[in-house]
Amino acid sequence: MMLDLRDPVCMSILLEGEWEPWLSGYFLNAVKPGMTVLDIGAHSGYFSLLAGMRTGPTGKVHAFEPNPFHHRNLIKSATLNGFGHVKLHQVMVSDKRGETFMRTRGEGGTSIFYPDLVELNGVTETRVKLGLLTDYLDPSLKADVIKIDIDGGEPYIMDSLLQIVDRNDKMIVFMEYLPILWEQTDPVPYMRQLASRGFQIFNVPRAGAIEPTTPDELAKFNGIVHLDLLLVR
């Protein structure tokens, strides 16, 4: 895996040999040979590469990552591993098409910068493509596992996500949940829509067993450290 050591996630992968181990194990168990996996917010490609390894060449992995530096490294990583079934989309998935500026900090490998929460030096703006999630997927696509980690952009993909959900049966979704980044959007109605479509919702803690939860219980969450949710149908 190609890693940019200026990026804290990449540095952690190098030092620890893994990323978010409390989540990685469940992800590896969920992905089976021949499955189709969507990695929405692929970053440097850790989960995309795990998915590519587990699905094998009979499966398909769609990785979505707007950051051009991470996209280049992800292409190299997939090529080095012979993962021709990992398809990369350099786009910021949203509820509209066009272009926008992604604000990042540092050089090369970067992390999303939250201008409303912190003040940092060395902020740069990169023009990136905006697009609908469904624009990049065949209308007949059957997704088995979806991982979502887009740092507050979740509200903008929910309509597209529900379209994909509605044309599938069994499905597993991993989603980072931090409502403080959802701006003025209330996440609870979306979580209720997913629950009404037959998903059981679990919190995956950093230590210990997974815990069942509900949209109403999630409505009470106001932490500044994200939850990792596992949704199973």
Image (cartoon, grey):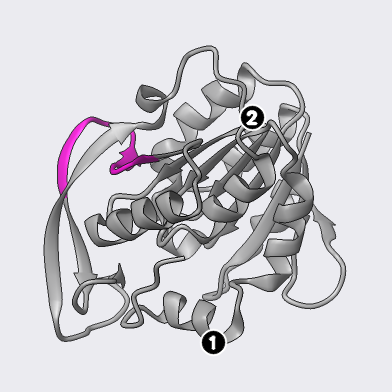
Quarter of the C terminus within the rendering? top right
Please tell me which of labels 2 and 1 falls first in the chain: 1
Q: Residue at x 45, y 75 (%)?
A: 9
- What secondary structure is marked by label 1? helix
Whether residue 93 is in magenta: the answer is yes
Mark 2 → mark 1, Cα distance in angstroms: 32 Å
Q: Position of residue 67 (x, y in %)?
A: 27, 56
- Above or below, 190 against 108 in this view is above
Per the rendered image, the range of residues in magenta is 88-100
Q: Position of residue 118 (x, y in %)?
A: 29, 81
Classified by dominant secondary structure, the portion drawn in magenta counts as strand
Residue of label 2: 58
Pick the front one: 142 or 161:
142
Q: Residue at x 75, y 60 (%)?
A: 203
Which marked residue is nearer to the observer: mark 2 or mark 1? 2
The numbered dot on residue 15 is 1
- What secondary structure is marked by label 2? loop
Q: Position of residue 207 (x, y in %)?
A: 79, 78
Please state if 106 lies on the left or on the right of 206 as rendered.
Answer: left
Whether residue 99 is in magenta: the answer is yes
Q: Which residue type carries mark 1?
A: Leu
Q: Which residue type carries mark 2?
A: Thr
